[in-house]
Amino acid sequence: MNDSREKIIEVYDLVKRFGHFEANKHLTFDVYRGEIFGFLGANGAGKTTAMKILCGLSKPTSGSVKVAGVDVNRHPEAVKKRIGYMSQFFSLYNDLTVKENFRFYGGVYGLGKKEIQQRTRYFLDKLNMQGYESMLLRNIPLGWKQKLAFSVASIHRPDIIFLDEPTGGVDPITRRQFWEMIYEASENGTTVFVTTHYMDEAEYCERVSIMSEGEIKALGRPRELKDRYGVKNMNDVFLRIARNVE
Amino acid sequence: MSVTINIKNLVKSYKKVEALKDISLIIKPNELFGFIGPDGAGKTTLFRILTSLILPDSGLITVDQWDVIRDFKNIRKITGYMPGRFSLYMDLTVQENLEFYAKLFGTNIQENYDLIKDVYEQIAPFKNRRAGALSGGMKQKLALSCALIHKPRLLVLDEPTTGVDAVSRKEFWELLKKMQKKDITILVSTPYMDEAALCDRVALMQSGKLLSLDTPQQIINDFKGNLFAIRTEKMYTLLNSLTAFDAEMQVYRFGESLHLSTSLNPSEAKEKITRYLTEKGYREIYIEQVTPVIEDCFLALMNKTIVS
């Protein structure tokens, strides 16, 4: 049934080598428009390497990668306009105000003054943060910062948002509010490509892939994977695959 | 050998932010004690005061007979501390890092090798690699080896598993359990609620306050009301539907299901919810009473503090 949907990421036989080390070994997978796709794996499994290639920051050694219809290898700059990126560690500028962060990223993505203002107001209304636009980012609590970072990453209406461990360190209520934002984006047709170490969040994804030693060892809906391995939750699926038990 | 820690009325503020609001607790000898809470809970501030890196505004901490301010030199000698950000020298090799820490405390690797053996063996194959070139999980193990090399009686680990994958986290906790058997008092902080179950006792923390302090089992026993896991064939709208149903019930996502807590008795709750969802057009309704885990308790305690 997925096949009828538009493919927004198409990866075929992707290989990335650093010297003799193969960080990505023949990855092949697709992601559909509007899908929430969980990109899981152990530390050092090759997730970051693959993600950098998808974002046009690094070139594959071989294989083909299409993101939003663009060949990443040939047009890395064109890809960057179609995607948003947020990481837990560095997305926003602490010594700029909330509004200035929106203006900066809006400017980077080539939005006009008026549109930036509109988009800023739209997001601040949505987050119930009217009145905070002139506050320095460093004075904003972490949970709000992460929601702002997600909004800023969406300012240019990207086709895909890449989220690299977006919810690290936040409390369980804020973590769930953050996922509501992810669902909403997905409902509106934005594809969400997310990495996380919280295995309960893996359950929230439509499909997940699990990498280990440079390969995708499993890919499917959480329900399918749990059935396949005969376990109760994604944590156990992950332990099975990444620990190479049996 | 292992120490008792007594924390009394501890207060610490940074300019406008009250990082610790009158915290008191006692940690018993040889306990594996967890501080569980999100960023901003005050975990790191508490550990920095305990390790005499910063001073409290008021209140006191004693480690056995020693006061953390007056006798800080004695406490430092018996404490192994692994800060949240890596404490390693990235341009030294694995072995050089370990030798450095051993020398700093006037010992050598051979003398206490027995203690670090379980941890160090896992990274020994890479002993000539620079620390900067290790994976996250291996850095963690090296940092733990360095914190243990002087045979401390107190081990303080600030978020050792943050950003670490589920496999490495599991291995790390297995190592901590082994360490505990060597008669060390272990304090560990973590934002991962599921790790609470692995501690002897835990303090659940939020915004500088203790929400709860007990054994993980007792915290679960203290959960008020009945908890249900609910799934239907259509999950996306289910949260909104159930949130609108009854203000008395708390509903939130939990893994593949929603969790709903209510003061209604189980059979009444089941029947009422099933009827409501059927009327709303949901099919394949799965509803089952479940035992809460620490994250459920944390959410309930957070909601309670927001309301009060």
Image: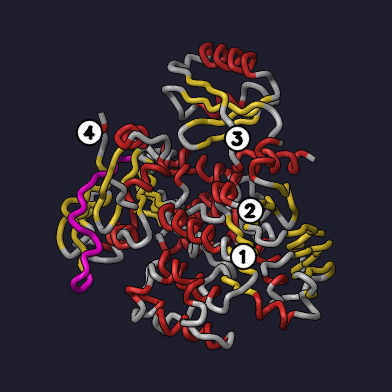
Judge the density around disc 1: few (<14), some (14-19), many (≥20) Cα neighbours within 10 Å.
some
Q: Kindly identify which residue carries mark 4.
A: A3
Judge the density around disc 2: few (<14), some (14-19), many (≥20) Cα neighbours within 10 Å.
many
Measured as percent of width and height from the top left, residue B85 is found at 54, 70
Between circles 2 and 4, the one closer to the viewer is 2
Does the residue at mark 2 contact the one at mark 4 (Cβ under 8 Å)?
Answer: no
Q: Residue at x 80, y 64 (%)?
A: B10
Rendering quarter of residue A187: top left
Q: Secondary structure at mark 1?
A: loop
Span colored in magenta: A18-33
Identify the mark nearer the N-term, 2 or 1.
Answer: 2
Q: Amino acid at mark 4?
A: Asp
Q: Kindly identify which residue carries mark 2.
A: B37
Q: Residue at x 37, y 80 (%)?
A: B130
Chain of the residue under the numbered disc 2 shown in the image: B
Q: CA distance from mark 2 to mark 4?
A: 42 Å
Q: CA distance from mark 1 to mark 3?
A: 32 Å
Q: Kindly identify which residue carries mark 1.
A: B183
Q: Secondary structure at mark 4?
A: helix
Q: Kindly identify which residue carries mark 3.
A: B292
